[in-house]
Amino acid sequence: MTGFAAALALTAAPVQADICKYSDADGNIHYSNLAPEKGWKRLSCTIGDNGAQQPAGAAGGGAARRTPTPAGFPRVDGETQKVRDDMRKKVLNDELAAEQKLLAEARAAYADGAPAPLPDERADAEKYRVRIGKLRQTVTVHERNIDALKKELALVK
């Protein structure tokens, strides 16, 4: 995250969200507030900010009860919200462009799973396989970041 994006994230108001724990087909554990990937099994959910646990099979599908906004709570006028939404969209677009650049670099380094071995890797096949695994993982992380940013951008007004 860029410094500006980090500052924006720190100043943003807290939002209630259901954080769920999932297990994928390989048994890896994932935590997310987004819909799970196909084949993931929901293990539990923490509902909103109160930390209440909801078992995997509980009724309601993770929908938390929301309390109404207090009458005296300050409201943001439409123009201020539009400026905030525009800034959010710009930050997300900047982050997306940065991730796309990093993905292109990672793919070039990965070279479709067959990068040229480094001099010290020519005699050590295990060292070469470890490097390829790390390169593959880097590509995957950037692809997931891009997908998440695109989903977030689709939600911006």
Image (spheres, helix red, strand yellow):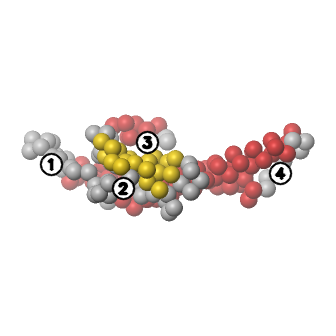
Q: Residues within 10 Å of mark 3 (few under 14, many from 20)?
A: some
Residue under label 1, please give it: 68
Q: Horizontally, is 103 left or right of 47 in the view?
A: right
Above or below for 152 versus 130: below
Report if residue 156 is visible in the image: no
What is the three-letter code of the residue carrying label 4? Ala
Q: Residue 11: where, in percent of width, then height? A: 33, 37
Q: Which residue is mark 3?
A: 5
Q: Badge 2 is on which residue?
A: 57
CB contact under 8 Å: marks 1 and 3: no
Mark-to-mark CA distance, 1 and 4: 60 Å
Local packing at callout 1 (Cα closer than 10 Å; few below 14, some 14-19, many 20+) is few
Reading the chain from its start, which is encountered first: label 1 or label 2?
A: 2
Could you tell me which secondary element the residue under label 1 belongs to?
loop
Q: Say which label, 1 or 3, has the lower sequence index.
A: 3
| Image marks 2 and 3: residues in contact by CB distance under 8 Å | no
Residue type at numbered disc 2: Gly
Residue 136 x/y as whole percent: 68, 52
Q: Could you tell me which residue is drawn at 47 percent across and 51 percent down? A: 22
Residue 34 falls left or right of residue 26: left
* Label located before the other in sequence (1 or 4): 1
Q: Are marks 3 and 4 in contact (CB under 8 Å)?
A: no
Q: Nearer the viewer, mark 2 or mark 4?
A: 2
Name the residue type under label 3: Ala
Q: Secondary structure at mark 3?
A: helix
Task: Look at the image and tell me whether residue 48 can be seen.
Answer: yes
Inter-mark Cα distance, 2 to 3: 37 Å
CA separation, marks 1 and 3? Answer: 30 Å
Pick whichever, 51 or 146, lies toward us. Answer: 51
Q: Residue at x 79, y 53 (%)?
A: 115
